């Protein structure tokens, strides 16, 4: 008989395994809850979210934030530009660089996508006990530290 989640999570290795599974399952579920008609892949959608959070960035900066190679980011930016979600312009002082910014359509897509996912998650949270919601609130800073960029 396989060990229970509670038993496995008693060790750091077990906790790591169970946390990874739970976070990935939640991520997959949230990925399903996308804005209808959004045909952009989740990885490319992350580029829009990065621009929304950080503002105008170079292709190289975007690649670094998303931890992909610059040629991959160039392809993603080209796809987003073709769909009207981002605009590119030359850097003022470095002619080799291109700066990328969100268009109004890109911002609207990010906000609609977030709103839909937040609504789904809020509805799930309402089904939890007050103690469970309090435990999640207490865990948020810890999860943020775990997820922090190096």
Image (spheres, grey):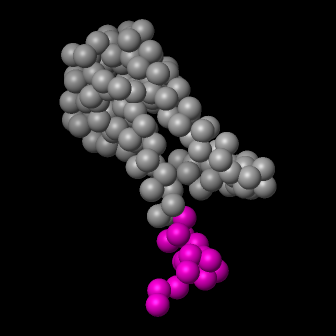
- Which residues are the magenta region? 1-19
- View extreme (bottom): residue: 1
For residue 53, above or below residue 69: above
x, y percent for residue 2: 47, 86
- View extreme (front): residue: 127
For residue 8, above or below residue 150: below
Q: Is residue 104 visible?
A: yes
Q: Looking at the rendering, which quadrant does residue 9 occupy?
A: bottom right
147 lies left or right of 83 = right
x, y percent for residue 76: 26, 30
Residue shown at 39%/27% (left/top)?
35
- The question of residue 131 being in magenta is answered with no
Residue shown at 21%/16% (left/top)?
82
Residue shown at 40%/41% (left/top)?
31
SS majority, magenta = helix
- Total marks in image: 0
Q: Is residue 102 visible?
A: no
x, y percent for residue 43: 33, 39
- The question of residue 7 being in magenta is answered with yes
134 lies left or right of 47 = right
x, y percent for residue 8: 56, 80
Residue shown at 62%/77% (left/top)?
6
128 lies left or right of 1 = right
């Amino acid at each position: 008989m396989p060990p229970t989640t509670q038993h496995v999570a008693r060790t750091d290795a077990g906790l790591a395994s169970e946390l990874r599974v739970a976070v990935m399952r939640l991520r997959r579920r949230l990925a399903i809850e996308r804005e209808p008609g959004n045909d952009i892949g989740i990885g490319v959608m992350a580029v829009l979210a990065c621009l929304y959070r950080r503002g105008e960035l170079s292709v190289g900066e975007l690649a670094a934030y998303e931890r992909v190679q610059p040629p991959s980011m160039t392809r993603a930016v080209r796809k987003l530009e073709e769909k009207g979600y981002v605009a590119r312009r030359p850097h003022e002082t470095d002619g080799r660089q291109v700066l990328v910014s969100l268009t109004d359509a890109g911002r609207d897509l990010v906000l609609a996508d977030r709103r839909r996912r937040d609504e789904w998650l809020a509805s799930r949270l309402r089904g939890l006990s007050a103690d469970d919601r309090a435990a999640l609130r207490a865990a948020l800073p810890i999860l943020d530290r775990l997820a922090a960029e190096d």
